[in-house]
Image: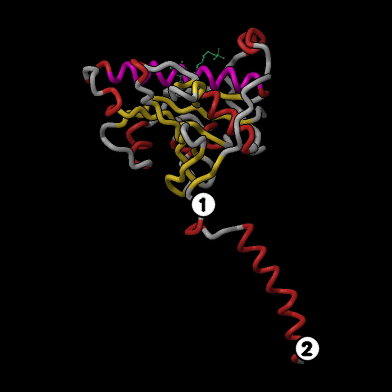
Amino acid sequence: MRQRVTAILLFLVPMLAAIVVVHPPVALAQQTIQLPAPRIEGGMPLMSAIARRQSIRAYSERPLPNEILSNLLWAAFGINRRDAGERTAPSWRGSKETDIYVATSEAVWLYDPAAHALQHMMNGDIRATTGRQPFPATAPAVLIYVADRARMAEAPEQEQYLYAHVDAAFVAQNVYLFATSEGLGTVVLGNVEKAELAQMMKLRSNQILTFTQPIGYPK
Ligand SMILES: Cc1cc2nc3c(=O)[nH]c(=O)nc-3n(C[C@H](O)[C@H](O)[C@H](O)COP(=O)(O)O)c2cc1C
C-alpha cells in the first residue's frame, strides 16, 4: 500500500509542479513582459505596402507571436534613434505624449518603449469596449492610444486635444503599414465609447483616449 502511495506521489508531484509553472495563478501573473529585440530591417518594400494598405475588420483567432508584437510596437512608436530616444512617429514638439496600451483576451498592458517591454496594467478582457462595432472583441490584440496631457503642458488645452489625435494618427499609420507588410489586418477606430473605456482602464483626467486599433491575422 505504502509503495503504491509513493508511486502515485512520484507521478503526481512533478505533474502538479508543471501545471503551476505553465499556468501561473492570476495573482502571480507576470508584471512585465520583456519583448524580444525588434527586427528593424526587411519587410515589404514601402511602395508595395502603401499600395496594399487597407482597413480589415475580420480577424482569425490565431494569436500574435511575441516576435510580431515586438516588431509591431517598435514600428508603431518605438525608439529608432537610441542616443536621443527619438521615435518612429513624429509628435508635437517631440512631446511623445502617446502611450500604447495593448488589450488581449486576458489583460491590458502598457508598452514601455525605453525598455521595449510590456508592463501589466490590469487583468480582464476589455476588448469589447474598444469599439462600438462587434469585431474588436475578436481581435487577438487591440492597441489603445492614450495621450498624456502633462507632456504637452506648453500647448493651450484645445490644441492638446488636436495634437493628441494627430500624433496618434501617425502611430496608427505606422501600424497600418507594418500590418500590411506582415500580412496582418487592422483598422483605426474613432467610434469608441471613450468615457466608458477610460473609466474601465482607470485613466487619469489629464489623459486623452484618442483612437483604438484592433490587429490580427485576417479571417
Ligand atoms: C479618424 C478615423 C476614425 C475611424 N473610425 C473608424 C471606426 O470607428 N470604425 C471603422 O470601422 N472604421 C473606422 N475608420 C476607418 C475608415 O472607415 C477607413 O479608413 C475608410 O473607410 C477607408 O477605408 P480604407 O482604410 O480601407 O482605405 C476610421 C478612420 C479614421 C481615419
Q: Main secondary structure of the magenta part?
A: helix
Dot 2 crowding, Cα within 10 Å, few <14, some 14–19, many 20+: few
In the picture as drawn, the residue positioned furthest to the left comes out as 156
Is 166 within the magenta? yes
* Numbered circle sitting on residue 30: 1
Residue 199 in percent (x, y) is at 33, 40
C-alpha separation, residue under disc 2 versus residue under disc 1: 39 Å
Instruction: State the residue in front, 16 or 210.
Output: 16
**Amino acid type, mark 1:** Gln
Residue at x-position 50% and y-position 58% = 28
Left or right: 18 in relation to 70? right
* Numbered circle sitting on residue 53: none
Image height check: is 18 above or below 147? below
Residue 106 in percent (x, y) is at 52, 47
Q: Quadrant of the C terminus?
A: top right
Residue 64 in percent (x, y) is at 63, 36
Residue at x-position 56% and y-position 19% = 176
Q: Quadrant of the N terminus?
A: bottom right
Residue 154 in percent (x, y) is at 23, 19
* Numbered circle sitting on residue 3: 2
Is 207 within the magenta? no
The boundaries of the magenta stretch are: 160-181
Residue at x-position 65% and y-position 34% = 60
